[in-house]
Amino acid sequence: MTQAKDLDYTIHHLCVYDKDPRQHMWPYLRWHHGITGYFTGDTFHIADEGHADYTFLGCGGRAFQIQLEAPPYQFKYEQEWYAKHGNGYNHICWIVNDARQSYEQLQADGAIVMQEFQPFPTYDGFVMSDPEGRWIEIMEYTHDTFRVQEFTNQPAGECGLRMIGFVEVVNDLDAMSDWYQKALDLRVQEHYQNGAGGQIHLVDKFYDARERNTVMVLRTARGDEERAAMAGKGPYISAILYEAKDIERAFADGEWAGMEAIAAPAEDPLTGLKTAKLREPSGNLVELREAASS
């Protein structure tokens, strides 16, 4: 069987389920983002069970993006998720070089099938869940020209803002870190311990601090909001992760753009980094950290 290291797992996007993405994308656009892909339900991803509109947005970083996805959604299992949770961060997508082989490999490594392998007009793909239940989408581009556009890795705006990844809250930090290293060939970049909890930063094999600094953060619940969310819905995607050269300016720009201020920039006692929190239009958290000096 093909091994994870041979499949080139690449972190690609975080999917946001949102009943009104055409309106909710405007604060992102005002906050130094750009549209990298726009697909309407009339022409893209129509299934017998439903369809969805997609808007891809990027900010500063080269590869990692967010995907705003509108109901009624393509498949029944997605419709059931939205009926239960409403607007929220739904899944992380990874690009591979062979989706069929990935489909077999991930099952062998303990992932659970949510949507079976299917060929679509522009890619092959499927959806599984990790051992704690968070969804993972896998895509292999198969069309000669279709790709979601990437930006160059150039921080945006005067504040030097980049969207660099996402945060997932877990039950068992070490077990989930080990699983992602084995099943998706990730590597540990940073590990912070805090009593029985902590935080681990994982990167794929294409990570480059200057050109492609995409990060997956796993951590135990921190703060009242994450603890309440864990109690209500279990392990979940908590936040989009950004960095900025000028975090105070980035935070102010986010407020001006329409993001809700949650926590002003201050030193994080766990990581030692200056961090801040905002809330984006769909109601989810945005986590902002100060970029390291170059």
Image: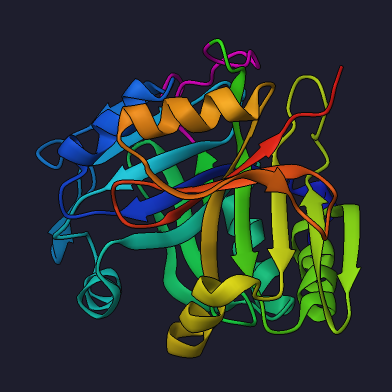
Residue 115 versus residue 279 in the image, above or below = below
Residue 194 occupies quadrant: bottom right
Q: Which residue is situated farthest in the left direction here?
A: 42
Choose between 72 and 287: the one closer to the eye.
Answer: 287
State left or right for residue 245 relative to residue 232: right
Q: Nearer the viewer, residue 190 or 202?
A: 190
Say if the magenta span includes residue 98.
Answer: no
Q: Which residues are magenta?
A: 142-157
Q: Position of residue 164 (x, y in %)?
A: 64, 36
Whether residue 90 can be seen here: yes
In percent of the image, x 79 and y 64: which residue is there? 199
Is 255 displayed left or right of 161 in the figure? left
Q: Is residue 47 above or below residue 273?
A: below
Residue 152 among those drawn in magenta: yes
The chief SS type of the magenta part is: loop
Say which of 292 and 112 sits in front: 292
Position in image of residue 35 (x %, y %): 35, 22
Whether residue 140 sits left or right of residue 256 in the image: it is: right
Q: Position of residue 169 (x, y in %)?
A: 62, 71
Q: Quadrant of the N terminus?
A: bottom right
Q: From where the camera sits, is residue 47 visible?
A: no
